[in-house]
Structures are given as C-alpha cells and as structure tokens.
Image (tube, rainbow, N blue to C red):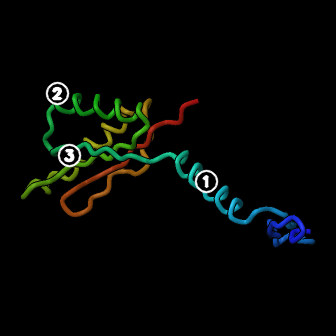
Amino acid sequence: MAKAQELDLVEIAPNVDPPVCKIVDYGKFLYEQKKKAKEMKAKASKIVIKDIRFGPHTDEHDFNFKKNHAIKFLQEGCKVKAFVFFRGREIVFKEQGEILLLRFANELEEFGKAEQLPVLEGKRMQMVIGPKKKL
C-alpha cells in the first residue's frame, strides 16, 4: 500500500503487540519530530542562580539591602545562593557565618525555601534558597 501511494511505511510503536505502523512521508515525519523536540526544549524552564555574598561581620544595613535583592530574585523565579566568604583568619568565625545564613533563610521564609542548609567548603560557607511555587 505504501509503494502504491509512493510513501514510506514508518514503525510508530515497536514495543506494542502487534507493532503500530503508519504510511507517511518519512522526511516530513522526521521534520515534525525535530520541530516538536525543539518546542519542548524552548518551553522547558531555565534555572537561574543568583549569588549573594556576605562577610562574617556583615552589618544590619548591608544585610537588609542584600535581603531585599534576594526577595526580588526569588519573586522573579531565580534561585539564590547565599555565601559567607572567610578571608585569612576570619575562618575562626564559622559560627557567626552559619548564624548569618540561617537568619537570612529565616527572613526569606515567605518568599523561598532553603534547599540546602549552610555547608562549609574551603573558605566559603554557602546555602541555596529556591523560590516557592506560585499557585
């Protein structure tokens, strides 16, 4: 039947019993599949991560300023990676850095959820906060 119509016999679902086949133009079939895959890729959400850097002795005004930026980022749908950078002998103040990050996550509770608790990696202590899902 496919040769009579000058088209190709394409196997659509090979795992089903009996296998499903369709009589179509194979070139057009491939083109439509690539087009569907491209559309799906374009619709996929891209995750953007914004960094916010603190020092272990960050003052109240700087903390609030950075918190407001983080709120804006979370409302846009971006993830926020907050980290405390320890220079030189500041590594002694690890507890202060952890308290600062936990306070930061607590203040952003209504806008985002902490995906990762503070973790010390080398000279940085970092945590990731993801946006809350919109209803």
23 to the left or right of 61: right
SS at mark 1 in the image = helix
Can you say whether 119 is above or below 2 in the image?
above
Q: What is the three-letter code of the residue carrying label 2?
A: His
Q: Which residue is mark 3?
A: 96
Nearer the observer, 112 or 13:
13
Nearer the observer, 109 or 111:
111
Q: What is the three-letter code of the residue carrying label 3?
A: Gln
Res 61 label: 2
From the top left corner, tell me how far across and down residue 108 is, in percent.
37, 33
Residue pictured at 82% horizontal, 72% vertical: 15
What is the spatial separation of the Cα atoms under label 3 and label 1, in whole angstroms?
53 Å
Q: What is the three-letter code of the residue carrying label 1?
A: Lys
SS at mark 2 in the image = helix
**Numbered label tally:** 3
Question: Residue 52 sits in which quadrant?
Answer: top left
The quarter of the picture where the N terminus appears is bottom right
From the top left corner, tell me how far across and down residue 105 is, in percent.
36, 39
Residue pictured at 15% horizontal, 38% vertical: 58
Mark 2 or 3, closer to the camera:
2
Q: Which residue is mark 1?
A: 35
- Mark 3: give few (<14), some (14-19) or many (20+) Cα within 10 Å: some
What is the spatial separation of the Cα atoms under label 1 and label 2, in whole angstroms?
51 Å
Closer to the N terminus: mark 1 or mark 2? 1
SS at mark 3 in the image = helix
Closer to the N terminus: mark 2 or mark 3? 2
- Mark 2: give few (<14), some (14-19) or many (20+) Cα within 10 Å: few
The quarter of the picture where the C terminus appears is top right
Closer to the N terminus: mark 3 or mark 1? 1
Nearer the observer, 71 or 14:
14
What is the spatial separation of the Cα atoms under label 2 and label 3, in whole angstroms?
17 Å
